[in-house]
Image (spheres, rainbow, N blue to C red):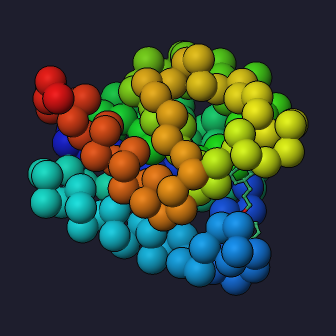
Amino acid sequence: MARELLVLNGPNLNLLGTREPDVYGADTLDDIVAELRSLAAERGYELRAVQSNVEGELVDALHAARGEVAGVVFNPGAYTHTSIALRDAISAVELPVVETHLSNVHAREEFRHTSMLSAVCLGVVGGFGRTSYRLALDALISHLDGATS
Ligand code: CA2
């Protein structure tokens, strides 16, 4: 298996850094991906990054990742709370996926408290802004490299 990882982002995350900085921070998605790329490189992994506002394109990106990458850091955006299609895709591709959120969804509206995806993910990280992505990447690589702590 290639030492490559996918960072996948869902709807509206292309707007990061341009609106609602109080909720989602001031960094752009490009800033976040650039930092993750360099952290991944330090640990011997290449990163590919995909963002889409279209549910089916996120499904396609997961399918395309199968056999090509070792794992996925995935912020599914609002599809977290609604998408059985993404849940089925995550199950189907049999890749370790870390569900990742900038905000603490449990401290927000009730409709954000449910995730369709968490049960088929390796784990969930949220509430730490861009640090959530760093923590998710670290956890994914530690899992892949067989770290025990
Ligand atoms: O906290 C997260 O990362 C979320 O996945 C973000 C989603 C939200 O629907 C989830 O409940 C939690 C929303 C992403 C919207 O991104 C924006 C970025 C900048 C400006 C406006 C929206």
Tell whether 64 sits left or right of 86: left
Tell whether 34 sits left or right of 23: left
Return the x and y of residue 36 as percentages of the image width and height: 34, 62
Return the x and y of residue 131 as percentages of the image width and height: 43, 60
Res 85 → quadrant: top right
Viewer-closest of 27 and 107 = 107
Query: On the rendered image, what quadrant is the N terminus found in?
Result: top left
Can residue 108 be seen here? The reply is yes
> Which quarter is ligand 1 in?
bottom right
Task: Please report the residue visible at 54 percent of the width from the left and 70 percent of the height from the top.
Answer: 29
Viewer-closest of 145 and 106 = 106
How many marks the image carries: the answer is 0
Task: Please report the residue visible at 14 percent of the width from the left and 52 percent of the height from the top.
Answer: 43
Residue 65 lies, with reference to residue 27, above or below; the image says above
Task: Please report the residue visible at 54 percent of the width from the left and 62 percent of the height from the top.
Answer: 129
Task: Please report the residue visible at 54 percent of the width from the left and 78 percent of the height from the top.
Answer: 27
Res 103 → quadrant: bottom right
Query: On the rendered image, what quadrant is the C terminus found in?
Result: top left
Return the x and y of residue 64 as percentages of the image width and height: 48, 37
Res 76 → quadrant: top right
Residue 92 lies, with reference to residue 40, above or below; the image says above
Can residue 83 be seen here? The reply is no
Return the x and y of residue 59 as percentages of the image width and height: 64, 35
